[in-house]
Image (tube, rainbow, N blue to C red):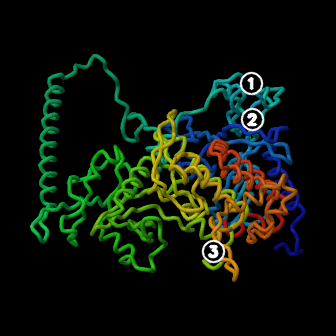
Amino acid sequence: MHPSGSLPLAALIFWVTAHLCSVHSNPAVPMNCTDTSRLCASFLAFKPDPNQTLSVLQSMFDVSPSDITVENPAALDYVFIRKNCSCLSTTKKYATNTTYTLRSAGGLVSEIVGGAYDGLAMVPNSTRWARVGAVVSLRLYCGCSSGLWNYLMSYVLRDGDSVQSLASRFGVSMDSIETVNGISNPDNVTVGDLYFIPLDSVPGEPYPLENATSPALAPAPASSIEGLPERPRDHKTHVPYGWIIGGVGVGLLVIILGIVAFISVRSSACSANRSKDGDGKISHKFHILRNPSFLCGSGRYICCKQGNWKQTNGESSNNQINVPTALGADVFDVEKPVVFSYEDILFSTDGFSDSSLLGHGTYGSVYYGVLHDQEVAIKRMTATKTKEFLVEMKVLCKVHHANLVELLGYAAMNDELLIIYEYAQKGSLRSHLHDPQSKGNPSLSWITRVQIALDAARGLEYIHEHTKNHYVHRDIKTSNILLDGAFRAKISDFGLAKLVGKSGEEEATVTKVVGTYGYLAPEYLSNGLATTKSDVYAFGVVLFEIISGREAVIRSEATAMKSAERRSLASIMLAALRNVPDSLSMSSIQDYIDPNLMELYPHDCFFKMAMLGKQCVDEDPVLRPDMKQVVITLSQILLSSVEWEATLAGNSQVFSGLVQGR
C-alpha cells in the first residue's frame, strides 16, 4: 500500500492505459442482419491447446463429434466447429450460443472466458469473480452468407496471417475475403481481430476419433530424433536379398506357430471354464475381461460364447456367469461391450443395498457403483427380460452421441442381467421438475430448461436421422432424460427401441403398443404404428412438463359427487393454448406455468416453447415437426433466452451463468 493511501500517478496512468488497450484488443463486431427468422450453418476456426481433447471441444462449443473437423489430422493444429448461426432479434447481429464450465478461479469471469475462446466469444460484461464449476452462457461470433458462398467461417487473425495467406490456405480468392469483411486495403488487417472466411464446402477433414482422448502429434522423422544422426542414402549399396527372404520366411513360421499356440491355449481355457453343476450337467463360465477401458467396440472376443443361457434345473452356481446363446459374435457386429465380473459389481453396489439404489426403471432397478475408479449406474434385470436386455445392448453399441447415455459394459449371473452405464450425477429430469424441493433438488432456471430440451432433442434427432440404421425410442419421458454434473441432458433406457429402417426407406413399423401412458401418440395407441413422429409426440409432452412443472398424467381431486379421473397433460395444455394468439395474451395459460420459475423467463420464448410443444402433440403425425426442425427451433429459443438473460446480468439471482440449478 502506498503511504498516501492511493496509487502513484505514474502507476495510475499505466493501469488506465493498459485497461484501455485490453478493451480495444478485440474490436470484432458481429455481422449485421435483418431477417431474425434466418438460421444458417456456419463455422468457427479454433486453435486448441494440446490438452483440449475432443470431449473438451464438444463441451466448449456445445456440438457433437460430427460437427468438428480438423485442418491437419496429424497435428490437430486448427479445428473447425460447425454451429447453427442466428440473427438476434434485438441487436440485429449474427451469433451462436454455447456454455462454458469454469475450471479455474482467481480471476474475472470475462477474462477467463475471453482467454478460453481466444477472440471468438462475445465476452459477457461481468465483473464477477470466477467460481470453479459455474456455467457461463455466452454467444460466439458467426455469420450467414449473403448467397454468394455456402458458409462463412469466423477466424481470429494471428501473427503471420495475411489476406493472401488465408486465401491460399482455404482455397478462396483474396477478393472474396475483402468483400465479406469490407477490407479496402489488404495490408491493413490487425492481428487479434476477427474476420470471416467465405467457403463453398466444409473445411478440413474428419476429426481422428481414434485419437480423441489425446491430441495426436505428427511423428518426427528418424533423422530428427535426438541422438540419432541422419543416415546418408547410398542407392548403390548392395541389398542382401537372401537375408531378407530368409528373414521373411522365419517370420512367417513364427507367426504360424504363434497362431497354433494361441488356439490351443484358448481351447484349453474354454475347457477349463466348463464345470459340472449339481446335477452333473455341463454349464459354461464366462470369460471375464478385466480391462479398465470402457470403450464399447474394443474388439475383444468373448470366450466360450456358445454356452447355455439358462440351466435346465433353473438354478445357477454361485461361481459362474452364464451367457445367453443370443450373445454370439453376430449380435454386436464388430463392437462388443466390456464384460465385468459379478463380484466386482456386488462389491461396488454394497451387495445391491438400498443405500445404492438410484431408482426403478421400466425393466429393472438402477444402482450406483464405482468400477475401475469410475462412477457408474448399473441396471439390474431378471433373466426374463433377455429380449429388452439384448435390444438395449445392440442399440447402445451402435449409437454414440453426447446426448445419449453411454454403455460401459455388462455382466450376467444367477439368472440376472446387469447393464453398466455412465453415471448421471444430477439424476433424471423428472426429479427436478416435479416437486424438486422434496427431493432435495434446486428448481431449474429457464435457461437450464431450454438447454436440457435442446440436448434431448439432439439425442433424438441423432437416432432418427444420423445413424446408419434409424431407430424410434418408444419410451421418451422425463424419467428417461438424465442430467450430468453440468445439467446437460442424455437420453437413456433403450430397452424398447425399435429399428425403423435405413436412410431413404419408409420409416415405420407396426409393433405391440409399449411405453408410458401420457406420452403415447394417438396413432400408436390405435394401430401400433411406431414412427419417429410418435417419439416427437412424446417429446412434446416433455416440453409441456418442462414449462408447467406438471406430470404427464394429472389426477383430478375426488369430490363427494365425482370420483377422481386422470387427464393427460397434453390435452390440458392444448385446451389452454387454443385461444393464445401471441406472447402478449397468455392469461389463459398463466395457471399452467411452473411457479418454480418465479416469473423469471422471457414471455416470447415461453410462448414459442409452448407452441412448439403444441405442434409436437398434433393429432395428425404429418403435421408434427421432425426432430431436426425441433432442434432448430429450440436453438433459436435458447439464443433469444441468452440474449434476454444478458439484460439481467446485474441481478445476481437471475444471471444463469452462476445461478443454482445450472
User: Sequence-wise, which precedes: disc 3 or disc 1?
Assistant: 1
Cβ–Cβ below 8 Å for labels 2 and 3?
Answer: no
Label 3 sits on a secondary structure element that is loop
Tell me how far mark 2 sits from mark 1, CA to CA: 10 Å
Q: Nearer the viewer, mark 2 or mark 3?
A: 3
- Identify the image quadrant of residue 157: top right
Q: Which residue sits at x=86%, y=75%?
A: 3
Position of residue 186 measured from the top left corner of the image (x, y, whole percent): 78, 26
> Could one spot residue 501 in this view of the protein?
yes
- Residue situated in front as seen by the camera: 296 or 431: 431
Mark 2 Cα shell of 10 Å, populated few (<14), some (14-19), many (≥20): many
Residue type for callout 3: Asn
- Identify the image quadrant of residue 656: bottom right
Cβ–Cβ below 8 Å for labels 3 and 1?
Answer: no
Mark 1 sits on what residue?
148
- Residue situated in front as seen by the camera: 94 or 25: 94
Q: Which residue sits at x=45%, y=71%?
A: 368
- Residue situated in front as seen by the camera: 434 or 445: 434
Q: Is residue 23 above or below residue 176?
A: below
Label 2 sits on a secondary structure element that is loop
Quarter of the image with the N terminus is bottom right
| Lateral position of residue 571 relative to residue 227, left or right | right
Which residue lies most toward the front here? 561
Mark 3 sits on what residue?
441
Tell me how far mark 3 sits from mark 1, CA to CA: 50 Å
Residue type for callout 2: Cys
Which disc is residue 144 wearing? 2
